[in-house]
Image (cartoon, rainbow, N blue to C red):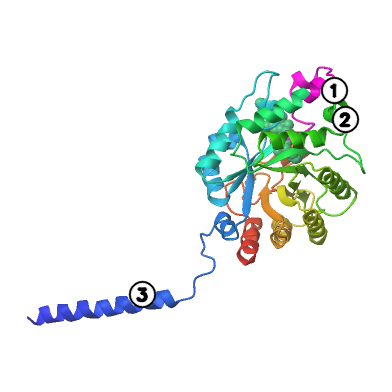
Amino acid sequence: MIFKGLNKYLSFSSLIILGLTATLLISLPAISQPANITLRDLAQEQNFHIGAAVSIKALRNDPTYREVLAREFNMVTPENVMKFKPIHPERDRYDFTAANEIVAFAKANQMQIRGHTLVWHRSLPDWLTETEWTREELMEILRRHIFTVISHYRGDIYAWDVVNEAVGGKDSLRKTIWQQGIGSDYVELAFRWAHEADPQALLFYNDYDGEGLGEKSDAIYSLVKDLLAKDVPIHGVGLQMHKSIKNPPKPEDVATNIKRLGELGLEVHITEMDVQIHNGTGTQEERLVKQAKVYQDILGVCLKAPNCTAFVTWGFTDKFTWIPRAFGQPDFPLIFDKSYRPKPAYQALVEVLSTANH
Ligand code: G3I
């Protein structure tokens, strides 16, 4: 009897305690940044695109790569497999296999896709470069290429890098197979064809070394301004942002450049960011801190600009990066280390995203 009464009393008091605890928990201020928050969660809150270039080899063979990619990013750029050579290996044959795999992965994980790239002077197949073409033939080849690739992915691609790295010196286009074989209007034609093929896709001009202020960014600015004056359908400029801690970009110059492009009505995406540390000074730890600052500055500048709508790194783990092969020495340019541990640069991006108001 006594026990029954005690039981009743205990369950009654436990209810009160439970209730009090719940009220207390609800009234506690929300923890602003739980330990397991991801870049993707934070970007999502800002309605912002955070992306990474994807290596098909890594995507196919490394489960951790897939897991981290889907967890941390809401946008992808195929690093190589949409380029002319892999996707159009023979004049009358396209090979969409690898690119389809990246598109399927992105769609399955609700990620946006940047298509990269339709018109470039590198990664061209021999069938194209080893024949002398007339202007009409080359135009037809490029038109068909653009039309076929864009149509294949119509509706799937958020933004295309239509023309890549076309600017040469001051006020002149780089002498490439396209510029020499078709003429300087190849740029304008490419954008018009791309728009015809997918009127919904955002169309970008993408380049390196024109992120801040200077001759090259002026040349890019006048190129896109001229295109707009001719009613060419171009919607944005990609600032690649391949940088190093030795020569970091000046954040205020990048901000000014993004702003002037915005005044033309153009969006900006940071499209290929990585930060080399091999040529810097200090211990490895000090270099990684300097690297973090460069990432932090650029994401900060982008988030402050209303027309800067995506921030994409060129890979995300030091396990898979083009830099050591291209520069002939080890380097660690990305935000996760080779074992997928977040580096100071990752923490820096988390911090900027947590405090931003895009
Ligand atoms: O796919 C072949 C493979 O079949 C072959 O066995 C192997 C042997 O070397 O080469 C493989 O192709 C390489 C490809 O990357 C895939 O790994 C090419 O040789 C190599 O030149 C290519 O390099 C890429 C480069 O663009 C040229 O397309 C880099 O990975 C890629 O990061 C780099 O990306 C460019 C952007 O598209 C534009 N902006 C600059 C950026 C860095 O250069």
Q: Amino acid at mark 2?
A: Gly
- The residue beneath circle 1 is 135
Above or below residue 77? Residue 48 is: below
Element at label 3 = helix
Residue 139 left/right relative to 49: right
The part of the image, by quadrant, that contains residue 187 is: top right
Q: Are marks 1 and 2 in contact (CB under 8 Å)?
A: yes
Tell whether position 46 is magenta: no
Residue 175 left/right relative to 164: right
Can see residue 97? yes
Can see residue 81? no
Task: Judge depth for marks 3 and 2 and give the one in front.
Answer: 2
Q: Amino acid at mark 1?
A: Arg
The part of the image, by quadrant, that contains residue 43 is: bottom right
Tell whether position 123 is magenta: yes
**Tag 2 or tag 1, which sits nearer the N-term?**
1
Q: Are marks 3 and 1 in contact (CB under 8 Å)?
A: no
- Given the current orientation, which residue lies at the most extreme front position? 231
Above or below residue 225? Residue 346 is: below
Residue at mark 3 to residue at mark 2: CA–CA distance: 71 Å
- The residue beneath circle 2 is 183
Assess disc 1: are there few (<14), some (14-19) or many (≥20) residues with their C-alpha within 10 Å of its C-alpha.
some
Residue at position x 49%, y 75% from top? Answer: 29
Assess disc 2: are there few (<14), some (14-19) or many (≥20) residues with their C-alpha within 10 Å of its C-alpha.
some
Question: Residue 332's x, y, as percent?
Answer: 69, 47
Question: Residue 132's x, y, as percent?
Answer: 84, 17
Which residue range is magenta in the image?
118-139
Above or below residue 160? Residue 334 is: below
Residue at mark 1 to residue at mark 2: CA–CA distance: 8 Å
- The residue beneath circle 3 is 22
